[in-house]
Image: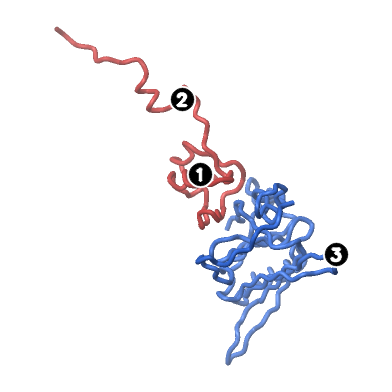
Amino acid sequence: MTLRPEVAALFELTSGVTRVHVSQLGHDYDLTRISLAEAEQLVAVPGFNRLRRKAVPPNDAGPVAATTGPAKGKRKKGA
Amino acid sequence: MATLTHLPGPQGKDNQPGLKGLIYIAPEEWFEKIAGLKTTTGAGDSVTIDGSHTFKDNPATPGVKYGFLTAYATQDTAQLKLDPTGERDGRGYKASLEFFNPGSGKEASEFARIIKNESCLMLVKTPDGIVQQVGSEGLGAEIVASYDSGKLSGGRRGNMFKAEAYQQGNQYYEGTIDLLPA
């Protein structure tokens, strides 16, 4: 009962529900197999709460944080 | 309570009759919370379910919840009707839903055997995607099946399911439909 890794990085299940029919989108979804794009589409449906976006701590912003850290310049060797 | 509004004609919009060929069914006892009708006063609110129903944990699969079962309905066999009940100054409606499920497998026979002893909520979908609910908390739909083997020369083999529920009118469900895992 786990999400695909790329989806799990950004979203989490809110309950033990894994299969849903979403009338607004006219489809059945197995939440353990949805793509990132489908996850984005689902959380945008008003009232849909079987999946939610994970809160990302400000200091754990991944690659973006890494690029904003102190510059690590190359050490010049020799003269 | 909502107020009365005008009743316009089709105004160029589609108004195709009938139901789609998938019926959603769940016994009342599977639900954690059965949402009721909205209590707000917007147009249509008094016949619209407020939010989504939620289900209990399924003891057969720890960590996974119950959900609606789906039943295939042979095309052009599903029909929902509401007829008035009661007397002057005290009227309600009886919803009647029927659909044909083909086949004579053990699963269908077992389903027919058990479901007649349950009180259920059912959801059906119109061709234009509107979801209507049959039954409500404490007034679930009773479902019975009539089996027909058909004849060698013709007929249909399978179960004609008929459900009845007493309610105040058509009920519209706009929430998420949780499904029982396959």
Marks 2 and 1, the one that precedes in the sequence: 1
Dividing the picture into quadrants, the one containing residue B101 is bottom right
Residue B58 at what x, y percent from top left?
68, 51
Colour of the chain lettered B: blue
Identify the residue position indicated by label 1 in the image: A44
Q: Using the image, determine if residue B95 lies above or below residue B62.
A: below
Identify the residue position indicated by label 3 in the image: B89
Front one among A72 and B52: B52
Q: Is mark 1 on a helix, strand or loop?
A: loop
Q: Please identify, in this view, whether the residue under mark 1 or under mark 3 is nearer the observer.
A: 3
Q: Using the image, determine if residue B78 lies above or below residue B140.
A: below
Q: Which amino acid does label 3 sit on?
A: Asp
Q: What residue type is labelled 2?
A: Asp
Residue A3 at what x, y percent from top left?
50, 44
Q: Do the residues labelled 2 and 1 touch (CB within 8 Å)?
A: no
Q: Do labels 1 and 3 share a chain?
A: no
Residue A71 at what x, y percent from top left?
31, 15
Colour of the chain lettered A: red
Q: Is residue A72 left or right of residue B144?
A: left
Front one among A52 and B158: A52
Dividing the picture into quadrants, the one containing residue A13 is top right
Front one among B44 and B162: B44
Q: How far apart are marks 2 and 1 (CA)?
A: 24 Å
Residue B19 at what x, y percent from top left?
58, 69
Identify the residue position indicated by label 2 in the image: A60
Q: Please identify, in this view, whether the residue under mark 3 or under mark 2 is nearer the observer.
A: 3
Label 1 neighbour load within 10 Å: few <14, some 14-19, many 20+ = few
Q: What residue type is labelled 1?
A: Ala
Chain containing mark 3: B
